[in-house]
Amino acid sequence: MKAVIQRVNSASVLVDGQSVGAIGAGLVLLIGIAHVDTEDDIGYLVEKTVNLRIFPAESGDSGFDRSVIDINGGLLLVSQFTLYASTRKGRRPGFTDAAPPEVSQPVFDRLVAAFRATGVPVETGVFGAMMNVSLENAGPATFILDTAERLSPRRG
């Protein structure tokens, strides 16, 4: 599972011109799901995300001192299979590493439920829909989490 995490002042998702999800300060997560993703990937992504200290201290300095929990922020989760695009060969991306919708939608739904269980307010887009995502980056500060990396040793 991959997530592009953007720290935002606000964000929203429109589907067919209608708002389906919106948050104030918090995090937008663009989430890609692979064939091999498990409940362990869900647990890792949720725990890492809600506790990631990427917001400045209340004093306003530019350090990374507080989590989305600490700031009482929200999460906007958007499924995005294109995070598993392969652009190695040719000019058209390939998506063989992305799980098909019949596999990825139940995983995404479980991920949303796991995030909601943390008590952090969660909004979502509409799985599989063409969505217009608007956001105001805070920083900007953007981070990439790949749950497969948790299995690799840290460089020494």
Image (cartoon, rainbow, N blue to C red):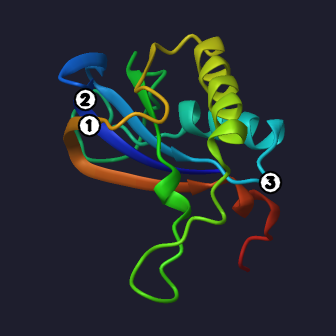
Q: Nearer the viewer, residue 94 or 29?
A: 94
Residue under numbered circle 1: 133
Which x, y percent locates residue 26? 35, 28
Residue at x-position 24% and y-position 36%: 132
Is 118 situated above or below 95?
above
Q: Residue 69 or 18: which is nearer the viewer?
A: 18
126 in relation to 147, above or below: above
Q: Residue at x 51, y 15 (%)?
A: 120
Residue type, label 3? Val
For discs 2 and 1, the disc positioned in front in the rendered view? 1
Between circles 3 and 2, the one closer to the viewer is: 3
**From mark 3 to mark 1, how far is it between C-alphas?**
27 Å
Q: Position of residue 155 (x, y in %)?
A: 71, 78
Percent of width and height locating residue 141:
31, 51
- Look at label 2 and name its amino acid: Ala
Which is nearer the N-term, disc 3 or disc 1?
3
Cα separation, mark 2 vs mark 1, equals 7 Å
Assess disc 1: are there few (<14), some (14-19) or many (≥20) residues with their C-alpha within 10 Å of its C-alpha: some
Q: Residues within 10 Å of mark 2 (few under 14, many from 20)?
A: many
Q: Which residue is mark 2?
A: 11
Label located before the other in sequence (3 or 2)? 2
Determine which residue is flagged by label 3. 36
